[in-house]
Image (cartoon, rainbow, N blue to C red):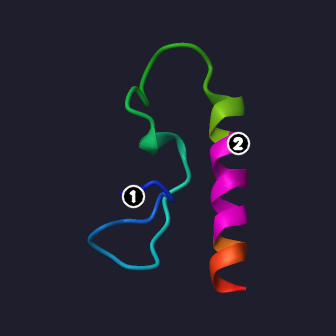
Amino acid sequence: MDHNCESYQVKRLFIADNSVHFNGIGGPNPTLTTEALATRTAGKLASIYF
């Protein structure tokens, strides 16, 4: 996955959930970080494709 959360194997597949974190299981509650990542990815999508 690149810095815009786009998959290398499948073009135009963006992953913006908790699985992109290197420590996606366990640890403190990552909800706000995941929401920020999803908002950032949505902004990138809007600027690239719309």
The residue type indicated by label 1 comes to Asp
Identified at 70% across, 42% down, the residue is 35
Q: Secondary structure at mark 2?
A: helix
Q: Are marks 2 and 1 in contact (CB under 8 Å)?
A: no
The correct choice, above or below, for 25 with respect to 47 in the image is above
- Please name whichever residue, 12 or 17, is drawn nearer the observer in this view of the structure: 12
Tell me, for residue 35, which label it has, or none: 2
Identified at 49% across, 14% down, the residue is 27
Task: Give the residue number, with chain letter if any, for mark 1.
Answer: 2
The correct choice, above or below, for 43 with respect to 33 in the image is below
Identified at 45% across, 35% down, the residue is 21
The local crowd at label 2, few if under 14, some if 14 to 19, many if 20 or more residues have their Cα within 10 Å, is: some
Q: Main secondary structure of the magenta part?
A: helix
Q: Position of residue 15 (x, y in %)?
A: 49, 58
Q: Position of residue 49 (x, y in %)?
A: 64, 84
Identified at 37% across, 65% down, the residue is 7
Badge 2 or badge 1: first in the primary sequence? 1
Numbered range of the magenta stretch: 35-44
Instruction: Tell me the quarter of the image containing the C terminus.
Output: bottom right
Q: Position of residue 20 (x, y in %)?
A: 44, 44
Q: Is residue 16 left or right of residue 39?
A: left
The residue type indicated by label 2 comes to Glu
